[in-house]
Image: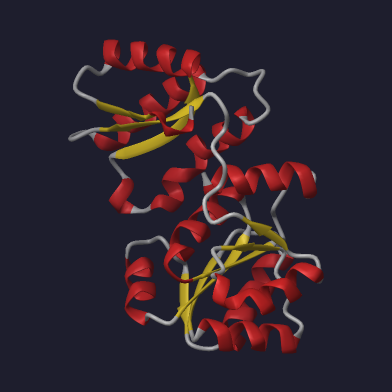
Amino acid sequence: NQYLALSRVARERFSGLLGGKVLLSIGADGLASIIAASIAGAASLWVDSDADILRAAMRAGLCDFVVGTLDEALRILKNEVRQKRAVSVGLHADPASCLRECIDRGFQPDLLMGLPASLQEPTQIMVQRGAVLLPQSGPSEHGTSLLCWSVDSDAAPTMRRIGQIAAESLDAARADTPDRQHWLKSAPRYLGRAFANRQCLRMDRNESATFVARVRSDFPAVRLSTDEAGT
C-alpha cells in the first residue's frame, strides 16, 4: 500500500516520476517506507534512534547505507538525488532533534511518511514548505485484494515465471497498472533475500481469478493467499 500511495502521488504531483525526490520517514514504519521509495525511484532518509534495527536492515540488503550524522546522510543523498537515482539512507539519531536540525539547515524533503503525532510541529513546517505528507498506510484501491504467493524450492526461476503470469493478468485499462507492472519488475531487487521466495500484489477480482487459474495449472505447489480487506 505504501508503494501504491507513493505511485499515486507521483502521478498527481510529479508527472509520474519520483527520480530526484527525497522521502523522509521516522521510526518503526521507516523500513517499509524506504523500500517503497526505492522501488518507486525516490531517494529516502530513514531516521531511527535504534541503531540495531538500522544495521539489521542494511545487513538484510533492505537499506543501502547507515550513518551516524545528518552531514553524512546529506552527502550521500545529494549525489544520488542529483543523478535521480534511488538510494536509501538510515540515520541513527533522535528523530525530534534530527527534524529540528533539518529545518534549521534548510533540508527540505519532498515526501513525508510515518511521522508520529509527537512531531507535529516540524511536520507542519515541512508541509508548509512544500512537502507532501502521505498516510502511514496508503489507501487500498477499491475493489481489490492483496494476493500473495510463495514457493519452497527453485525460487528464482519459479518466482520470475509467476511474476510474468501476474503481469500478464493485469487489466491494462486500470490507471495503476503501470505502477503494479513496475512493482513486479523492480521489487525483487529491493526486497532483499528474506523475500526471495514470496511476493504480493494488489489485484481486482477478474485479475486475481485469471492469475490464480494459471498459477494453479502451471505451478500446483505454489502457496496462494488473499487478504480481502481492501475490497
Q: How is the image coloured?
A: secondary structure
Which residue does the image show at 37% across and 81% down from the upper left?
51
Rendering coords of residue 190 (x, y %):
45, 52
Residue at position x 61%, y 88% from top? Answer: 71
- The x and y percentages for residue 112 are 64, 64
Task: Give the left or right position of residue 175, taking residue 158 as reference.
Answer: right
- Name above or below for residue 87 compared with residue 96: above
Q: Is residue 120 left or right of residue 54?
A: right
Task: Report the front residue among 98 and 180.
Answer: 98
Instruction: Say whether residue 92 is left or right of residue 112.
Output: left
Residue 133, image quadrant: bottom right
Residue 40 vertical placement versus 85 (above, below): above
Residue at 73 percent of width and 67 percent of height:
82
Q: Please tell me whether residue 127 is drawn above or below residue 147 in the rendered image.
A: below
Residue 228, above or below 12 = above
Q: Residue 121's spot in the image, x, y percent?
A: 68, 78
Residue drawn at x 57%, y 37% is 182
Give residue 155's position: percent from left, percent from top: 26, 36
